[in-house]
Image: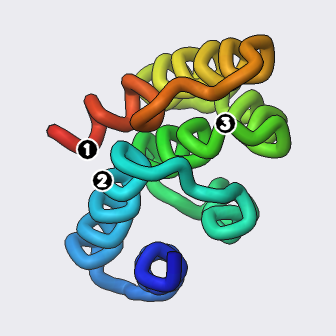
Amino acid sequence: MRAVERLVTIALSDESHPVRESALHATCAAATHHELPYRVVEPLAVAADDFEPVLLDYVLGILAATHDPAALPVVERFLRHPHPEVRRVAAEEVRELRRSRESARPTAGGSPDVRRICSA
């Protein structure tokens, strides 16, 4: 988890778009193999409004992959985002979070959208 915490810090602090995107991509990849605790990625939720739309896809996917109910209100906010792609991703991740909330056990291997975003 220390590596993921460091990646989150880089995604939040580095000025270079390629470095921020790489850090988010690596975090996303980790989420496809391990269920990340919300507390580890919560700084992304706090700063979500500061990310440009292309990076929001990663952020929303990472938050949903936690399967934590605390991520739901954050992701739901983006259902009204001005960019249609962000709204689409937010809708998919809201469905994922609601599905995981309704099931007794979260799905293994992260959300399908996290795998889609990370493989792009």
Q: Are marks 1 and 2 in contact (CB under 8 Å)?
A: yes
Residue toward you, 79 or 11: 11
Q: Which residue is mark 1?
A: 118
Q: Which type of secondary structure does the marked residue at label 2 adopt?
A: helix
Amino acid type of disc 2? Ala
Q: Which type of secondary structure does the marked residue at label 1 adopt?
A: helix
Choose top left, top right, bottom left or bottom right for residue 42: bottom right
Amino acid type of disc 1? Cys
The crowding category of the residue bearing disc 1, from other C-alpha atoms within 10 Å (few below 14, some 14 to 19, many at least 20), is many
Q: Is residue 1 visible?
A: yes
Please state the horizontal and vertical placement of residue 40, each as a whole percent of the image: 64, 69
Choose top left, top right, bottom left or bottom right for residue 30: bottom left
Amino acid type of disc 3? His
Judged left or right of residue 100, residue 109 is left
Q: Which residue is mark 2?
A: 29
- Measured in 3D between alpha carbons, the distance from the residue under mark 3 to the one under mark 1, in whole angstroms, is 17 Å
Choose top left, top right, bottom left or bottom right for residue 116: top left
* Mark 1 or 2, nearer chain start: 2
* Mark 3 or 1, nearer chain start: 3
The crowding category of the residue bearing disc 3, from other C-alpha atoms within 10 Å (few below 14, some 14 to 19, many at least 20), is many
* Mark 2 or 3, nearer chain start: 2
Nearer mark to the viewer, of 1 and 2 = 2
Q: Which type of secondary structure does the marked residue at label 3 adopt?
A: loop
Q: Is residue 55 visible?
A: no
Judged left or right of residue 3, residue 104 is right
Task: Name the disc covering residue 67, or none.
Answer: 3
- Measured in 3D between alpha carbons, the distance from the residue under mark 2 to the one under mark 3, in whole angstroms, is 16 Å
Is residue 99 placed above or below 27 in the rendered structure? above
Task: Name the disc covering residue 71, or none.
Answer: none
- For the point 25% across and 44% down, which residue is it? 118
